[in-house]
Image (cartoon, grey):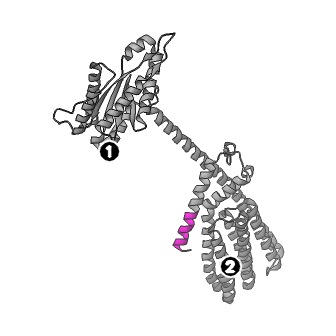
């Protein structure tokens, strides 16, 4: 009964409780939706589900049985003083019966409920409790005289009745405990020191009705616990389905519906996250702004369907050329934005050229027998410099893109550093590489 023992029991209960719920939630074959309806009963469940539910029930309710046993042990010792007070001659008997025999049995059952046992063992504990309380109380009552005997046997019957409400066991074991208590009560009244056996039996009949009522209440409790288990599983499954739906909606909200790559809003969020994360070195960040050359003419000539195919094809080529090493998004219309991290000027230029040459290999299907239409892109490349914000860096890449358009299209132009910042060696190197290209 130490704090560490209680903590260990709580931890064990919590683990078994969580495991049972996780299994019931995920294994749909074990607990199909048809068994989650209010009309289903526990006897409809398979043996595997019954075993799972027993684990859940023990974890959820074993604390009640242990609490009752702990209270019973405590009051058992208190009643030793009461026994001596009403009849000093009971001192030795109460020390042996209450102090040793009954307390030892109850303490053993308390520790037995410290972990899950086979269902028949757990059920049999209530029968043992019933027999222990009835026989122990009856023996002390018989030793104390007629009035004490009737008082003790009646009190024992009601003590068993309270136990019935607390022990999380199957109903058949509840019935077994009730029958044990009623039979022992009747036998003791017939054979014990009572003034009027007939009156005692009628009294026994009255109190037996009370304990049967307690058993009926227990049956309703068991049904309620089964419904609570089903309700919890339904709730967990609904939460899981909702979380999955929200995740899917979030993904859909972050993607461009035509190309399947990120949209402008999600890319802005990613750039802001990268910008605020010290793990990303800003001098190693580069931005590519891409635009499909002559797209309006292609769209007007070949139609919007072919235009859409062109945009999707370019998006695929960009994604493949990045090798999962950057962020690619549709910036709007026929424009695309690529963000590279942990890169150098020469590497960023190489990525831009790889994208550009990859797009050149794209061939669009055209109506009729017309030759396939070639596709090219112009690219503006900007590398971080000074204290530039993301918007400033994107604007520089956009300006470089327009320079590429003015210079004849289908090429990569590297943006010059801001006027108040001298070019970095890497930028000068990339510009020379571009000039050479």
Residue 289 makes an appearance in the image: yes
Disc number placed over residue 280 in the picture, else none: 1
Position of residue 390 relative to residue 62, above or below, is above
Position of residue 344 relative to residue 146, above or below, is above
Q: Is residue 9 magenta?
A: yes
What's the residue at 70%, 66% (across, down)? 122
Q: Mark 2 points at which residue?
A: 102
Residue nearest the viewer, comparing 123 with 333: 333
Residue nearest the viewer, comparing 283 with 180: 283
User: Where does the N terminus fall, quadrant-wise?
Assistant: bottom right
User: Where does the C terminus fall, quadrant-wise?
Assistant: top left
Q: Give the range drawn in magenta.
A: 1-12
| Mark 2 surroundings within 10 Å by alpha-carbon count, few (fewer than 14), some (14 through 19), many (20 or more) | many
The extreme front residue here reads 436
Q: Residue 106: give x, y in percent of width and height.
A: 66, 75
Q: Tag 2, which secondary structure?
A: helix
Q: Which mark's residue is nearer the viewer, 1 or 2? A: 1
| Mark 1 surroundings within 10 Å by alpha-carbon count, few (fewer than 14), some (14 through 19), many (20 or more) | some
Q: Residue 112: give x, y in percent of width and height.
A: 65, 71
Compared across the picture, whether 103 is left or right of 192 comes to left
Q: How far apart are marks 1 and 2 (CA)?
A: 70 Å
Main secondary structure of the magenta stretch: helix
Q: Residue 166: give x, y in percent of width and height.
A: 65, 64
Q: Tag 1, which secondary structure?
A: loop
Q: Is residue 297 magenta?
A: no
Compared across the picture, whether 292 is left or right of 147 comes to left
Q: Residue 301: give x, y in percent of width and height.
A: 42, 10
Residue nearest the viewer, comparing 415 with 130: 415
**Label located before the other in sequence (1 or 2):** 2
* The quadrant where residue 286 appears: top left
Position of residue 409 relative to residue 343, above or below, is above
Compared across the picture, whether 191 is left or right of 215 comes to right
């Amino acid at each position: 009964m130490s704090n560490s023992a209680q903590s260990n029991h709580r931890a064990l209960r919590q683990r078994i409780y969580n495991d049972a719920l996780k299994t019931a939630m995920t294994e749909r074959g074990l607990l199909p939706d048809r068994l989650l309806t209010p009309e289903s009963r526990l006897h409809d469940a398979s043996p595997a589900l019954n075993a799972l539910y027993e684990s859940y029930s023990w974890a959820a309710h074993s604390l009640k049985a242990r609490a009752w046993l702990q209270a019973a042990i405590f009051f058992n010792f208190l009643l030793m003083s009461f026994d001596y007070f009403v009849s000093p001659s009971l001192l030795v008997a109460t020390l042996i019966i209450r102090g040793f025999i009954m307390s030892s049995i109850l303490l053993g059952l308390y520790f037995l409920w410290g972990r899950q046992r086979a269902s028949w063992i757990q059920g049999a504990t209530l029968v043992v409790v019933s027999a222990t309380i009835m026989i122990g109380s009856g023996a002390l009552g018989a030793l104390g005289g007629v009035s004490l005997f009737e008082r003790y046997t009646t009190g024992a019957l009601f003590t068993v009745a309270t136990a019935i409400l607390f022990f999380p066991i199957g109903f058949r074991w509840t019935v077994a405990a009730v029958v044990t208590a009623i039979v022992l009560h009747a036998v003791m009244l017939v054979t014990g020191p009572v003034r009027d056996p007939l009156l005692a039996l009628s009294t026994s009949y009255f109190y037996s009705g009370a304990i049967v009522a307690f058993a009926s209440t227990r049956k309703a409790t068991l049904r309620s616990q089964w419904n609570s288990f089903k309700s919890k599983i339904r709730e967990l499954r609904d939460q899981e389905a909702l979380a999955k739906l929200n995740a899917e909606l979030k993904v859909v909200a972050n993607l461009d519906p035509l190309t399947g790559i990120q949209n402008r809003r999600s890319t802005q969020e990613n750039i802001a996250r990268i910008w605020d994360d010290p793990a990303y070195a800003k001098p190693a960040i580069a931005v590519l702004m891409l635009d499909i050359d002559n797209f309006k003419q292609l769209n007007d000539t070949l139609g919007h369907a072919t235009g859409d195919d062109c945009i999707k094809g370019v998006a695929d080529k960009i994604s493949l050329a990045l090798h999962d090493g950057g962020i690619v998004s549709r910036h709007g219309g026929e424009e695309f934005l690529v963000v590279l991290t942990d890169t150098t000027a020469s590497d960023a230029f190489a990525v831009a050229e790889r994208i550009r040459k990859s797009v050149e290999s794209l061939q669009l299907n055209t109506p009729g027998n017309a030759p396939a239409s070639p596709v090219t892109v112009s690219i503006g490349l900007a590398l971080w410099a000074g204290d530039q914000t993301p918007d400033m860096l994107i604007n520089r890449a956009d300006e470089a893109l327009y320079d590429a358009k003015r210079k004849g299209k289908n090429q990569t132009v590297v943006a010059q550093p801001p006027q108040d910042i001298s070019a970095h060696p890497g930028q000068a190197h990339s510009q020379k590489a571009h000039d050479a290209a």
